[in-house]
Amino acid sequence: MAFVSPTKRDQNGSYTFSSRPRPVEDRSKYREPPSEQTQSNYGNIMYDRRVVRGNTYAQQIIPTTALPDPVEVQRQQEIRRRTVAAKRAREQCRTRTPEALQGRKHIDVQTDLYLEELSDVIVASDIECQTDAFLDKPATPLFIPATSGKDVETQIEEGELFDFDREVQALLELLVGKTVEQSLEEVMEEEELAGLRAQQRAFRELRNNELEEVLRLKEQERRRSKEKERRVAQQKEVLRKEREVAEKIAARAFTQQYLADLLPAVFTSLRSHGYFYDPVEKDIETNFFPWLMAEVNNSLEKRYTARALLDTIIDDVAQKRQEAFKDTQ
């Protein structure tokens, strides 16, 4: 249904436009196929498919004329290249006039059957003249001003204006005074330099002595630190060896104790299970085993005694070493 848009004119002569409200058409989120698109009844160019959106500089413009055939272009380039090559060959094969000798040059001449007068040739002639030599400039005369007034003369006797002995006395006193003053300054400067050299020599000797003392103290400290490190390393080595000996002794005692308990248990188990039915074995059980056990007991008693004695000696030595190590620290 079409609505008529009423147009009114105000008292001032301007036009106003108003339209009745109408519902907005429902549009899908995505573009529909051309066959399913509905025909809009309004002319908004923002929704016109013929309007190009975005930058148009990068778009490919289809030329009005058809593009040339690549084969035809290649054929024309080949023809042009052959023409240039043939022209270059003809220029190289053409007979040319030999070059002119040194000091000469070629000129154009007429080679036609009928001679023609060259009217553009200008007749030229050489004319020369000699000028006189330049004369030397004379010397400038000395300027002598014109005299004015009257000349008057007088006679001055010897000693009236200047007495050399009297005038030179002040100059001699000044020269002698300056010489003596300069000599005294030089002597004082030499004495001051000598004092400075003596002071520098004394300071240098003192500094050398101090450097020697510092070097001696550094060497002494280095020897002490090295000796201390050696003693500490030696004591650590001794403690490590003692710890290893103690561990070996403990391991040996534990092994002996474990084997001593293991051997009777094995024989008892074998005897209880009835594995000794052989007469030889019986003889061994009745005669050899008691003697062996007695010897083992004796050996064990000796070992226990030696072990207790060794433990006492090790304990005493360890206590002495520990006390000596504490004293050294």
Image (cartoon, grey):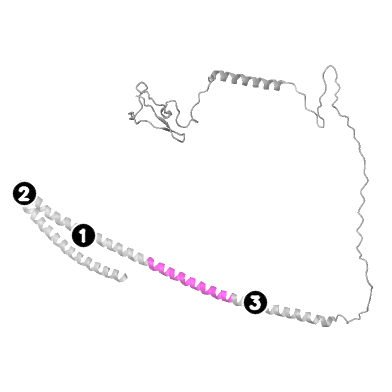
Looking at the rendering, the stretch of residues picked out in magenta corresponds to 197-226
Q: Position of residue 72 (x, y in %)?
A: 56, 18
Q: Position of residue 166 (x, y in %)?
A: 82, 83
Residue 223, quarter of picture: bottom left
Q: Position of residue 24 (x, y in %)?
A: 34, 30
Residue 171, quarter of picture: bottom right
Task: Check disc 2 and report the residue beneath it.
Answer: 271
Task: Check disc 3 and report the residue beneath it.
Answer: 189
**Which label's residue is closer to the chain start, 1 or 2?**
1
Q: Residue furthest bottom?
A: 166
Report the side of 33 relative to 97 (left or right): left
Is the residue marked by circle 3 packed among few (<14), some (14-19), or many (20+) residues within 10 Å?
Answer: few
Q: Tell me the tag on residue 249.
A: 1
Which residue type carries mark 2? Answer: Arg
Which residue type carries mark 3? Answer: Glu
Position of 157 relative to 2 (above/below): below
Residue at left 63%, top 19%? 82
